[in-house]
Amino acid sequence: MKIEIEIFYDTEQTDELIKLGIDVSEEMLDIRKVTFYRIDAIEPYNYNDKNYSTINCSGVLYTSPIPYKTLKKLIEEQ
């Protein structure tokens, strides 16, 4: 399997805010495309009344702005 998925990434600014103990909103994060060759699991993730997904790949969790049902369908179509 090979699939490209958008993932939230911290920026230098959000890293600094997190170090200071300040909450960061998802609007402050970068979104980058990542190519996955293997996905172990996905699950729904709700934050600030918005639907996202988490992706488990080799023990690392990634958060995607793609809603769970949409992401599940994309993966199943591969």
Image (cartoon, helix red, strand yellow):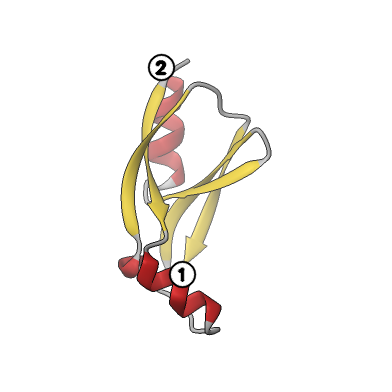
Image position of 40 with respect to 51: above or below: above
Could you tell me how far apart the alpha carbons at marks 1 and 2 are, in whole angstroms? 34 Å
Q: Quadrant of the C terminus?
A: top left
Residue drawn at 62 percent across, 43 percent down: 60
Q: Read off the residue under disc 2.
A: 78
Q: Read off the residue under disc 1.
A: 15
Q: Amino acid at mark 2?
A: Gln
**Image coordinates for residue 69, horizontal then vertical, percent:** 44, 40
Residue drawn at 65 percent across, 33 percent down: 58
Q: Does residue 16 appear to the left or right of 43 in the view shown?
A: left
Q: Amino acid at mark 1?
A: Asp
- The first of marks 1 and 2 along the sequence is 1
Residue drawn at 49 percent across, 84 percent down: 22
**Image coordinates for residue 16, horizontal then vertical, percent:** 45, 76
Q: Nearer the viewer, mark 1 or mark 2?
A: 1
**Image coordinates for residue 63, horizontal then vertical, percent:** 48, 50
